[in-house]
């Protein structure tokens, strides 16, 4: 069973592009999601998943249906005795933390706190209905980065740019990115220069609100008395349906030795 | 004949003391050896938590040999052997063995130093005296490597302690230095811009720490440059090849010349000399 091709304009975004794909042998289904095209085909004893990348495509495009993905694809085959008639498409958070660098340098003045919004890239997961993962596809291939005070101590992560919007209405939701609300606090007497914000996405849950926007749990970051930096993980926005639980164990409250390890 | 009668008969024929000694020996063997084995395993388990699997294996082996020797000594004492004679003989034997196995002893002691210092772990890629390979095991006498072309290399511990070891996978990120020369008429600002775009577009290149652009020297045929890009250690091979290929393609695309070695040769025209002038 397939849905007819439906091209959606950015004005009608966001929408739920994820969900189940039900096909009989010989049928195919396609998904255009920003720079990635996905073509799924059901055969008697296998599923084939084809990926086409178009880096110059409209990042907001979303289209679903047979035939929406044209041209050559990079194919992968998944054999099984009883393939069933359903595959599941899901958005999942990046497997590493994402270091978001503000486009414009941002300074938090002494004794102030703000709520900022940063978005992180999502992966597209193709899985069986029982949760068996067939493939995780990076929708936008992010560059790698290193988040730490020096080249010995730190963590490999992905790099991203952020406008660091401070008002939720200014935020532009992209269908293949998840939004995180970050509460930045600076109780110190000196300005806090925020040159990067590391979002520990493997420790966060992913959810969707009623409008189809994708959100992670919120974060609170700031300087504690004594110079220690701290991050704590909050809740998903109210009324959000959970799509993915944290990959790593969530931290209720995590202190690190230096402020530079969290906000640089 | 029931068990009581059988016991009385054995006591009568062998003597109560001999029977008691055999019972103690049996108990030592039946209880002592499994206890020693369990204790060695427990020591190995404790060592594994703090010191890693290879060190733990060595600790477990040492503990087992020591406890096994203690059980054997106890058994011999129960059987009436004079251990002082044995210890004396063992001393002489140790001296003789020491002379005969100086190299092995040196390797064992070097191995203990290596286990303490831990310059590498199994799975690390190390370079020693020109050989690069993955450490497959760290043993009492030697370290085994598997080279990238699948050769098995055994390096004695003694040699490792003396040699300069480069651990290529100790840290999670490494720097790839792209060294290239450009022609003297090249616009260095444009060269730097092309190189920075190259790093920005390559997913394997880390955006932080930022790449570093350096002018190293003025060579005979061009300006010597170095562009250093940080990458994940596990991507080092793929990244260094990809970055160099892309550098070449991008330089060609924008017309930046990588000069060949060249010499300027000036030919001086001497005035012709007629035969009459000679």
Image (cartoon, helix red, strand yellow):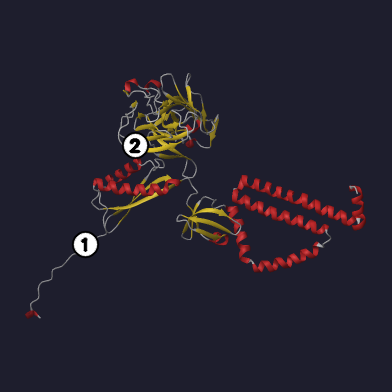
Count all numbered tags in the image, as a single digit.
2
Which image quadrant is residue B204 in?
A: top left
- Do badges 1 and 2 share one subunit? no
Residue in the image at 51% along x and 59% along y: B153
The answer for how far apart the CA atoms under marks 1 and 2 are is: 53 Å
Left or right of A140? Residue B20 is right
Quadrant of the rendering where the N terminus of chain A is positioned: top left
Taking depth in this image into account, of B90 and A186 the one nearest to the observer is: B90
Q: Chain of mark 1?
A: B
Is residue B70 in sight in this rendering? yes
Residue B264 vs A183, above or below: the answer is below
Which image quadrant is residue B72 in?
A: bottom right
Residue A240 vs A35, above or below: the answer is above
Mark 2 falls on what kind of element? Answer: loop
> Which mark is drawn over residue B245?
none
Image x and y of residue A86, in percent: 44, 27
Residue B10 vs B209, above or below: the answer is below
Residue in the image at 35% along x and 47% along y: B243
Task: Kindly identify which residue carries mark 2.
Answer: A73
Residue in the image at 85% along x and 55% along y: B21
Give neighbour class at mark 1: few <14, some 14-19, many 20+ (Cα, 10 Å). Answer: few
Taking depth in this image into account, of A220 and A244 the one nearest to the observer is: A244
Image x and y of residue B135, in percent: 52, 53
Image x and y of residue B141, in percent: 60, 59
Residue in the image at 77% along x and 58% along y: B73
Q: Chain of mark 2?
A: A
Image x and y of residue A257, in percent: 53, 37
Left or right of B114? Residue A102 is left
Give neighbour class at mark 2: few <14, some 14-19, many 20+ (Cα, 10 Å). Answer: some
Circles 1 and 2: CB atoms closer than 8 Å: no
């Amino acid at each position: 069973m397939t849905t007819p091709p439906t091209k959606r304009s950015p004005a009608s975004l966001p929408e739920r592009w994820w969900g189940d794909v039900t096909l009989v042998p010989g049928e195919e289904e396609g998904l255009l999601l920003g720079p990635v095209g996905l073509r799924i085909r059901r055969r008697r004893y296998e599923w084939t998943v084809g990926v086409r990348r178009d880096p110059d495509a409209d990042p907001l495009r979303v289209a679903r249906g047979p035939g929406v993905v044209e041209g050559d694809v990079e194919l992968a085959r998944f054999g099984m005795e009883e393939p069933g008639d359903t595959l599941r498409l899901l958005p999942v958070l990046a497997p590493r933390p994402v270091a978001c660098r503000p486009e414009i340098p941002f300074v938090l003045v002494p004794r102030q706190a703000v709520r900022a919004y940063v978005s992180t890239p999502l992966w597209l997961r193709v899985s069986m209905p029982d949760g068996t993962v067939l493939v995780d596809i990076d929708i936008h291939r992010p560059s790698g980065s290193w988040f730490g005070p020096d080249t010995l101590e730190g963590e490999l992560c992905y790099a991203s740019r952020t406008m660091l919007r401070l008002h939720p209405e200014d935020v532009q939701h992209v269908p293949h990115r998840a939004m995180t609300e970050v509460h930045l606090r600076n109780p110190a007497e000196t300005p806090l220069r925020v040159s990067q914000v590391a979002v520990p996405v493997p420790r966060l849950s992913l959810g969707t609100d009623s409008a189809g926007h994708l959100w992670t749990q919120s974060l609170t970051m700031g300087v504690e008395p004594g110079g220690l930096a701290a991050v704590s993980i909050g809740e998903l926005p109210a009324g959000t349906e959970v799509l993915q639980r944290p990959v790593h164990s969530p931290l209720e409250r995590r202190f690190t030795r230096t402020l530079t390890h969290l906000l640089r | 004949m029931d068990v009581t009668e059988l016991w009385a008969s054995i006591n009568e024929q062998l003597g109560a003391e001999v029977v008691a000694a055999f019972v103690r020996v049996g108990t030592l063997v039946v209880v002592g050896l499994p206890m020693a084995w369990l204790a060695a395993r427990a020591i190995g388990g404790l060592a594994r938590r703090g010191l890693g699997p290879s060190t733990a294996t060595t600790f477990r082996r040492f503990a087992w040999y020591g406890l096994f020797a203690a059980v054997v000594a106890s058994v011999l004492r129960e059987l009436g052997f004079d251990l002082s004679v044995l210890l004396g003989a063992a001393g002489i034997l140790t001296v003789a063995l020491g002379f005969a196995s100086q190299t092995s002893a040196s390797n064992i002691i070097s191995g203990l130093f290596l286990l303490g210092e831990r310059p590498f772990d199994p799975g690390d890629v190390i370079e020693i005296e020109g050989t690069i390979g993955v450490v497959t095991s760290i043993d009492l006498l030697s370290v085994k490597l598997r080279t990238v072309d699948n050769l098995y290399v055994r390096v004695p511990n003694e040699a490792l302690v003396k040699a300069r070891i480069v651990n290529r996978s100790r840290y999670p990120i490494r720097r790839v230095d792209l060294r290239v020369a450009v022609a003297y008429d090249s616009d260095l600002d444009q060269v730097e811009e092309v190189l920075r775009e190259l790093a920005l577009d390559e997913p394997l290149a880390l955006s932080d720490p930022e790449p570093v652009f350096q002018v190293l020297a003025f060579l005979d045929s061009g300006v010597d440059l170095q562009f250093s890009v940080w990458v994940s250690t596990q991507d080092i091979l793929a990244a260094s090849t990809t970055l160099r290929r892309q550098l070449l393609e991008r330089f060609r695309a924008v017309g930046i010349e990588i000069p060949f070695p060249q010499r300027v040769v000036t030919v001086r025209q001497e005035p012709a000399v007629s035969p009459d002038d000679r």
